[in-house]
Amino acid sequence: MDQSLALTALSALANETRLEIVRLLVPEGNCGLSAGEIATHVNATASRLSFHLNILEQAGLIGARREGRFQRYSVNHARLGGVIGYLLNDCCKAHPDICACTTVE
């Protein structure tokens, strides 16, 4: 992953609401959630939610697709994984002590 793409994604994730949106969308898989469903979970007004979703889309971390009158949003798993991989492999050079901390028990 290119450093500028990683920095854009990390910058997008460096916000409580946007990080919560990504956390919310990851388990939803490709089905995703509508903007209304996301707004309810993160307690955001429509205009504020639109602002956050736009930043996440520009960073390539989420994508939207139209379903009738609604937009459904889902996580771009490849981009999110790419950011994590960039941190682990490029920045940390796959240091074993750092990688060991990432395993889930």
Image (cartoon, rainbow, N blue to C red):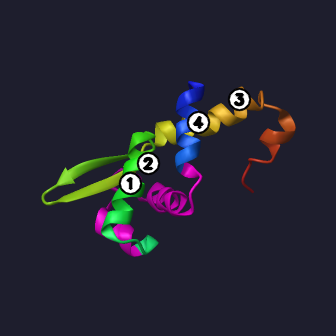
* Mark 2 → mark 1, Cα distance in angstroms: 5 Å
Task: Name the residue beneath numbered marker 1.
Answer: 53
Amino acid type, label 1: Leu
Task: Name the residue beneath numbered marker 3.
Answer: 89
| Cβ–Cβ under 8 Å for marks 2 and 1 | yes
* Mark 3 → mark 1, Cα distance in angstroms: 28 Å
Give the residue displayed 56% in from the left and 26% down from the top: 1
Give the residue displayed 30% in from the left and 48% down from the top: 64
Residue 56 position, x and y percent, is 44, 48
Amino acid type, label 4: Leu
Task: Name the residue beneath numbered marker 2.
Answer: 56
* Mark 4 → mark 1, Cα distance in angstroms: 17 Å
Element on which disc 1 rests: helix
Furthest residue in direction left, as rendered: 68
Sequence-earlier tag: 3 or 1:
1
Amino acid type, label 3: Asn
Give the residue displayed 19% in from the left and 51% down from the top: 66
User: Which disc, if any, is residue 86?
Assistant: none
